[in-house]
Image (tube, rainbow, N blue to C red):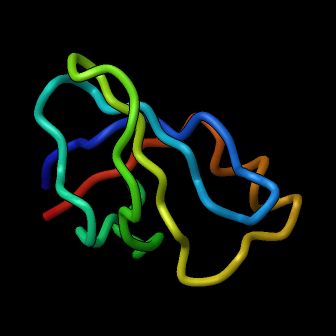
């Protein structure tokens, strides 16, 4: 598994915003997992600086406020 980045926030629509670890990032449509191996969702948008872009991830289901707080600071990975 390759580390993609760190989750920074949960948007009001329920998407996760992550910061890529470096200039190598997964393309849009790539399924992502958390560090425990649970599927979190798919990358729907890559934006920001080329050196370390931001990734917008649409989760499989919208997280509750408690779940949203628990995922912030977590790592996203892909196989």
* Residue for point 15% across, 25% down: 23
Whether residue 56 sits left or right of residue 62 in the image: it is left
* Depicted 50 relative to depicted 67: above or below: above
Whether residue 55 sits left or right of residue 79 in the image: it is right
Q: Number of numbered discs present?
A: 0
Q: Nearer the viewer, residue 50 or 15?
A: 50
* Residue for point 44% across, 73% down: 41
* Residue for point 34% across, 67% down: 37
Whether residue 25 sits left or right of residue 62 in the image: it is left
**Quarter in which the C terminus is drawn:** bottom left
- Where in the figure is residue 28, as x and y percent of width and height? 26, 62
Question: Which residue is farthest right?
Answer: 65
* Residue for point 18% across, 41% down: 25
- Where in the figure is residue 31, as x and y percent of width and height? 29, 72
Q: Nearer the viewer, residue 25 or 1?
A: 25
* Depicted 53 relative to depicted 11: above or below: above
Question: Which residue is farthest bottom?
Answer: 61
- Where in the figure is residue 5, as x and y percent of width and height? 35, 37
- Where in the figure is residue 57, as x and y percent of width and height? 47, 60
* Depicted 61 relative to depicted 31: above or below: below
Quarter-of-image position of residue 60? bottom right
**Quarter in which the N terminus is drawn:** bottom left
């Amino acid at each position: 598994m390759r580390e993609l980045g760190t989750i920074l926030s949960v948007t009001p629509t329920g998407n996760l915003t992550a910061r890529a670890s470096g200039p190598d990032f997964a393309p849009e449509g790539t399924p992502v997992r958390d560090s425990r191996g649970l599927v979190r969702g798919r990358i729907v948008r890559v934006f920001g600086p080329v050196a370390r872009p931001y990734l917008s991830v649409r989760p499989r289901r919208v997280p509750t406020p408690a779940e949203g707080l628990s995922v912030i600071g977590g790592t996203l990975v892909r196989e």
